[in-house]
Image (cartoon, helix red, strand yellow):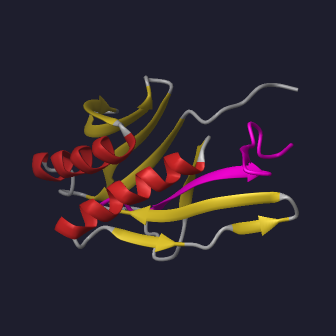
Amino acid sequence: MATMRFNHMELTFPRGTLTSDFRAEVDAFYGDVFGWQGVDTEVVGQLCHILLLEGAEQFILLAESGKPMSSPGYDHLGLLFSKRAEVDEKLEKVKRYQEKDDRVKIQEYEDLVTGDLVTHAFYVKHLLPIYFDVQCMERAGEPVPNALS
C-alpha cells in the first residue's frame, strides 16, 4: 500500500482580508503557540500567505477568494502531539493569548476514554476559519505512537 501523509490545506478568505496587519497577527499567534512560520508567496498570480508547519513539507495556505470558505461549526484539523504535557502547554499559551485578544476561541473537553485509549484534547480557533483540535492519545498513561494501532 502506498504511503500518504498530510501535505497542505488551503483556507480561503474574502478578498482584502490578507493585509499585512492580518498576516502579522496570524504569524504572531500561530508562531507563538505552535512554532509555525509565516511566509508570503505568490500562487497563480495571487499574493498568498503560507504557514509552514514542518519545513516546507507541511503547510497551510491562506488565499483570498470571491467564494471564501465558511465554517460556522466545529470543522477542524487535528494536531496530534506525543504527550499530555505538550497539549497542556499549548492550552496554557492559548489561554494567555486569549487574555489579551478575545477573538481567540477555546473549547475545552474532558478526556475521551474509549476502552483503554484516552484522548486528551482542546479546540482552538483564532483568525483562521477553522478550529484546530490539539490532542494526544495515550494507553495506560503512555503515548500512542500510531493512534490507529
* Residue 75 percent location from the top left of the image: 54, 66
* Residue 122 percent location from the top left of the image: 52, 64
Left or right relative to 16: residue 64: right
Q: Is residue 31 visible?
A: yes
Q: Which residue is painted at 36% across and 71% down in the image?
A: 105
* Residue 69 percent location from the top left of the image: 43, 63
Q: In this rendering, is residue 146 above or below 125?
A: above
Image quadrant in which you'd find residue 59:
top left
Q: In this rendering, is residue 132 above or below 147?
A: below
Q: In this rendering, is residue 45 above or below 26?
A: above
Residue 143 magenta-drawn?
Answer: yes
User: Which of the two residues, 35 or 75, is positioned nearer the viewer here?
Assistant: 35
Q: Which residues are magenta?
A: 127-149
* Residue 38 percent location from the top left of the image: 28, 36
Residue placed furthest toward the left: 21
Total numbered badges shown on the rendered structure: 0
Residue 21 magenta-drawn?
Answer: no
Q: Which residue is painted at 34% across and 33% down in the image?
A: 44
Q: Which quarter of the rendered picture does the N terminus lie within?
A: top right
Q: Is residue 101 visible?
A: no
Left or right relative to 28: residue 69: right
Residue placed furthest toward the front: 141
Q: Which residue is painted at 71% across and 68% down in the image?
A: 112
Q: Which quarter of the rendered picture does the C terminus lie within?
A: top right
